Amino acid sequence: MLKRYSILKNQFIGFCLMSFLMSLPTIVSASSVELGEQLVKDQCSTCHKFKGQSESRFKIKGPDLMWGGSKFKRPWLIDWLRGKEPNLYQEGYRWDVEQKPQPHVILSEEGANAVADYFEKHLMGFRVKKDAIDLSHFTELQAGFGRQIFIDHSCTGCHQIMDDGQKMGGPQSTTFFNSGKRLKKDWILRFNAMPPDFVPHSGEFVADVSELGLHYVTGFLATEGDDSFKFYEPWTSQHFKNADTKRGRTIYKEYCSQCHGAKGDGDGPAASGLEPKPAIHAKMAMDQFPLDYLYNVVYYGGKAVGKSPYMPYWGLTIGEQGVADVIAFMQDEFKGDSGASSGATAVAQKASGKCPEKRTTKKVSFKYSNKKNPLKPNASNLKAGETLYQKSAKPMNCQLCHGKNGNGKGPGGAGINPAPRNFTCSSTIKDVSDGQMFGIIKEGSPGTAMPAFKNLKDKQVWQMIHYIRQFSQ
């Protein structure tokens, strides 16, 4: 009897212990919510607003957080509360009172998590619709469009972004360095649509952008600095796997031939009035062009990749499948010199382009003209320049038009008028200053097919210039 009692007693103790352990998450969760609520009440609310109506920044001490749960990504919020993130307001939130950033209260890891829990449970903005924007098909080029819209609409007048490692813009309001790590996409979309809804009479600006433009600029801010975001690559999609050259031939006739000609000879009815002239596809090895470049120039137009603005953006007209089909047709139809014998091809590759080149290009702006190459032409910089020139520069590598040997006879250059520069011609290249070459690479060359390489960092451009100059030495 005693033995049975002992067994029952042990079973009862075990059951109680298990019940207690199972109840721990609920207890911890409740405790976390209570702690978060207490911290918000005792510390956060001394500066921030958590209830009521939106107010001007000139009536409160710190940013309004009534919708903080919809606004901030949890990992960033916790790091911010623990003092691991830099100040967002370089001139101070209330710059009318004191123009220097104020230190923020630093919480323990437990406290920061508790406040984050409170935000997620109690501070979800009613204006912010969940999954209002879909970025699953957002591309790197679209992020570039959004960045340009942000600049063109004077957003950098108050907000700073990074430009080639340097701060760009005014520091009056919150910075957007690594904004993709901090802000939720749906919040950004709703705020961008009408900022005064959240901070009325506070100097916030309403930009005149289209729905598509709003999508681009929101995507830019939602991905900026977020290394975990994977940009969509349309040229890897099912549309390209299903591409049909017959359909592409029809599309080429209906849309492309009006400029590029029925057989790709650049003699369409619109060509006579265009300068620069349409590319002569029949002379170009289209199968050697990078697929991402062809997609971007057809879908988004010439201007999107720094080429002629006469080339329209056809994506909205012919759709994703139409773009894939017409690219498949062009790559199958136009081979340039690649169909010649290997011996003839080899001779063509070695042959030097025209020298001296008598044409001139437009002088670059003053901000580039007096620049000198700050790098030494050492092995490391020459190797980096070679990699960019031959393989990795975007929107396309340089050898595609200028040739692997720099002679202006690349597989994509034969159909371009004027022809690509011949870098082996020392009598011409020696008179092109570092600043002129830098500006042309960065901004492109009007009246030619030379695109802008705005995404290259300054150091990369200088490395490439060193590599280009060695062709004529």
Image (spheres, helix red, strand yellow):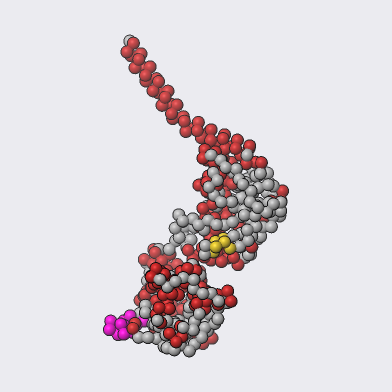
Question: What residue is rendered at 35% in x and 86% in y?
Answer: 351
Q: Is residue 95 magenta?
A: no
Q: How many numbered discs?
A: 0
Q: Position of residue 244 (x, y in %)?
A: 37, 71
At 69% from the left and 52% from the top, the residue drawn is 98
* Magenta span: chief secondary structure: helix
Which of the 4 image quadrants contains residue 365?
A: bottom right
Report the side of 195 relative to 180 (left or right).
right
- The answer to which image quadrant residue 3 occupies is top left
Q: Quadrant of the C terminus?
A: bottom left
x and y percentages locating residue 36 in the rendered image? 57, 37
Q: Nearer the viewer, residue 168 or 281?
A: 168
Residue 375 position (above or below residue 170): below
> Residue 425, percent across and down?
42, 85
Res. 300 visible in picture: no
Please state the horizontal and vertical placement of residue 103, each as a whole percent of the image: 61, 47
Residue in view at x 38 percent, y 17 percent: 9
Q: Is residue 173 above or below residue 241?
A: above
* Image point (69%, 49%), residue name: 55
Q: Which residues are magenta?
A: 336-348
- The relative height of residue 301 versus residue 227 in the rendered view (above or below) is below
Screen quadrant of the N terminus: top left
Q: Is residue 91 left or right of residue 161?
A: right
Residue 380 visible? The answer is yes
